[in-house]
Image (spheres, grey):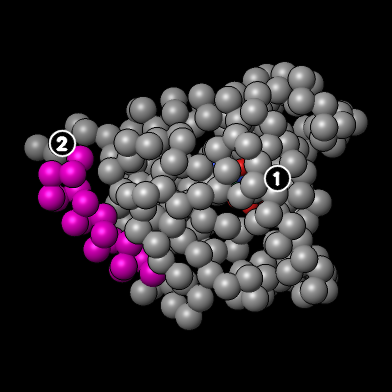
Amino acid sequence: MSSPKVIILAIDGPAGAGKSTIAKRLASRLGFLYIDTGAMYRAVGLWALRTGTSLSDAHRLEQLASMARVELLEGGTRVKLNGEDISDLIRTQQMSDAASKVSAVPGVRRALVDKQREMGARESVVMEGRDIGTNVFPQAQVKIYLDASVEVRAARRLRDLEAKGQAVPLEQVEREIRDRDMRDSTRGEAPLRQAPDAEYLDTSGMPVEQVEEAILRIYRERTANGKE
Ligand code: DC
């Protein structure tokens, strides 16, 4: 009989490190739920922009985050905000920037982290973000910190944007990534940081299959050696 124990595989790291691609593949290999926490911050950012809310109005942003009904559907690949499919709308440079800004507001983080903890309490998950191993699930059995050089991450982000028909100069993507890295890692509340017990993986020169196998090896070691 399979164990009823819930397993949390936490993947953190900066923008463009390959978290989403890898997390989706791992969730499908392991039969876990895939949860993209960045999509939740993007949804709040979208709502704020649509309602003309200032991205520095912490009180109002916290209210939006508490009220937001964010659903992750179709294996976590589609996102609904208050019943509307916003999956494509949130994948723009403007939304990356808005998400990064709203995510620095402590009240927004509290509201979304509560939702994330509820999701991970019910079933085994692969959860990706910036603070999963450090803050959302510090007790996660498996923690991975994915990284890559800024140049590699910008090139990957550019490919994603081009595939969606958005033409943005490489220098602009690189600048946006550097700005976001800075904001995400220097904010006061749950900044992007490697958890002391996370495995560090630089994916710069690694094919996706190799990253996936490396994480699966770590997963097997950590779930079999009594650490959990
Ligand atoms: O992973 P992403 O690029 O979709 O995330 C968008 C922004 O949301 C990111 O710049 C910082 C914020 N974020 C966060 O603060 N904490 C998380 N767990 C996930 C994302």
Q: Residues within 10 Å of mark 2 (few under 14, many from 20)?
A: few
Q: Residue furthest left?
A: 1
Drawn side of residue 15 relative to residue 129, left or right: right
Residue depicted at 65% across the width and 24% down the height: 107
Q: Residues within 10 Å of mark 1 (few under 14, many from 20)?
A: some
Earlier sequence position, callout 2 versus callout 1: 2
Q: Is residue 31 visible?
A: no
Q: Is residue 216 visible?
A: yes
**In front: label 2 or label 1:** 1
Residue drawn at (46%, 61%) of the image: 146
Q: Secondary structure at mark 2?
A: loop
Residue 221 badge: none
* Residues at marks 2 and 1 touching, judged by CB atoms closer than 8 Å: no
**Residue 132 pos. (x, y %):** 46, 41
Q: Which residues are magenta?
A: 211-228
**Residue 126 percent location from the top left of the image:** 40, 46
Q: In the image, is 60 to the left or to the right of 100?
A: right
Under 8 Å from ligand 1: the CB of mark 1?
yes
Q: CA distance from mark 2 to mark 1?
A: 37 Å
x, y percent for residue 130? 54, 47
**Residue 48 on the magenta span:** no
Residue at image point 76% right, 61% down: 176
The residue where tag 1 is placed is 100
Q: Which residue is mark 2?
A: 3
Quadrant housing the C terminus: top left
Which residue is rendered at x = 32% and y = 62% of the image?
215
